[in-house]
Image (tube, grey):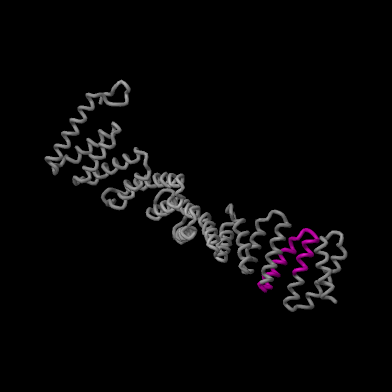
Amino acid sequence: AKFDESGTKPNASSMAKLHKLQDSISAFADRFPNRGHVVDLLLLAGSANRDLNDFSVAEGFWNRALLSDPSPTQRTLAIRGLVQSKIKGGKPEETLALTRNYLKLENFDQLGSGFQGELIGIVATSVKATAAELNAKGKVLDAGQLLVSVANEFPSIPDHDILYRDGAYYLALGGNWKESESAANAFLAGQRSKGNTEDLLYLKARALEYQLRFRKAAEAHLALAERYPKYAKALAAAQRAEGLAAAEDDYKLAGKAASLVGNYQSSPEGKTDALLRSADYYAKAKAWPESLQILAKAESQSRSPSYRLRTQLQIAKIWNAQGETAKALANYKRLAADAEQRKEDLDKSLYRSIIGESNFLLG
C-alpha cells in the first residue's frame, strides 16, 4: 500500500483498492460459502485491515471466518486476530473475558497445546491489569475474587501462586475475612509444590484473628513460626501466637510460643525473658516437666545474677507446687543466702520476692 504525506495512513488510491478487495471477498463468500478458499480469503481481508490498524473491520472478517467451517490452523489465526484486537483496544477486562471464553470452549486437542499456552499467558497479563484497574476504582473485593477465580480456573497460568496470593490479600483488604481464609485454606490444601506458602499461612492466621477465632489464630501463627523460622514475619507470628493463646487461657500453647519467641532474641536477656514467660505459662497449665525443662535451659544461659536467681526462684516454686517440699526448701534456703550476699546487685523487687517467699516457707 502507498501512504499519504504523513507516512502513517494509506493514500486514497490504496484505500480504494482495499475496499474493492474487501467487497469482492465478501461477495464471493456470500455466493460460494462452501468453496475451499473462502476462509483463506476472509483471513486475508482481516489481516489487511489489521496491518492498517483498522481492527473493527478486521474483526468482522475474523468472526465470519470462524463461522465458515475453518480448519484448526485457520481457526487459530482467526482467534489470535480477535484476541489481538482486544489487546490493541487497551481494555484488559474485555481481553480477559474473550480469552477465557475461548479457553473454555475451544478444542485444544485440535488447536494445539502451544496455542492454548499462548492464550493462558494473555489471561495472566490481562487479569493482572484488570485487577489493578478494579483496585484503583476501590473495587478491592472484586479484584480479589477475580484473581482467585482465574488462578483456580487455570492451574498452569504463569505466576499462578502470586495471582492467588494477591487475590486472597485483596479479599482480606476488602473486609471479607471469611472468604480470604477459605482461599488461603484451599491454596494450602493443594498437593503440588507452591511458592508463597508462608504468605498464605500468615494471611490465614490474620483472617482467623479478625473473625475473633483466637485459639485457631494462635495455632495458625505458631504453625507458621515453626515451619518457616526464616520468614520475615515469623517473629511477629510467634508473638501473636503467645498473646492470643494466653488471652484464651491456653497456657500450653502460650508456653510453646513464648519459647519460640526466645529463639529470635539476639540478647541473652531477651532469650531468658522469653523462656521465663514460657516456663510460667507451663506452670499455669500445671505442666511441671515442661516448665522445669524450660527453666533448666534458662538457668544454663543466664548471664547475670538477677536472671539466674529469678530462674531458681521459679524452680523452687514449682517444686513446692508439686509437693516436693524437701527440694523446694533446699532451693529457698540457698536462694535466701545468695540474695543476701548479692543484695546490692539485685533489683529491689526481686530481692524482696526471694527473701519474703523464702522466709515464709522456711519459717
Residue 316 pos. (x, y %):
77, 71
Q: Which quarter of the figure has residue 133?
A: top left
Q: Nearer the viewer, residue 362 or 140?
A: 140
Which picture quadrant has residue 65? top left
Image coordinates for residue 328, horizontal then vertical, percent: 78, 74
What secondary structure characterizes most of the magenta part? helix
Q: Is residue 42 left or right of residue 153?
A: left
Q: Residue at x 26, y 34 (%)?
A: 49
Numbered disc total: 0
Visible residue check, residue 225: yes
For residue 145, side relative to residue 264 (left or right): left
Rendered-image quadrant of the N terminus = top left
**Residue 289's x, y, as percent?**
68, 72
Which residues are the magenta region?
285-314
| The C terminus - image quarter | bottom right
Q: In this picture, is 233 found above or below 43?
A: below
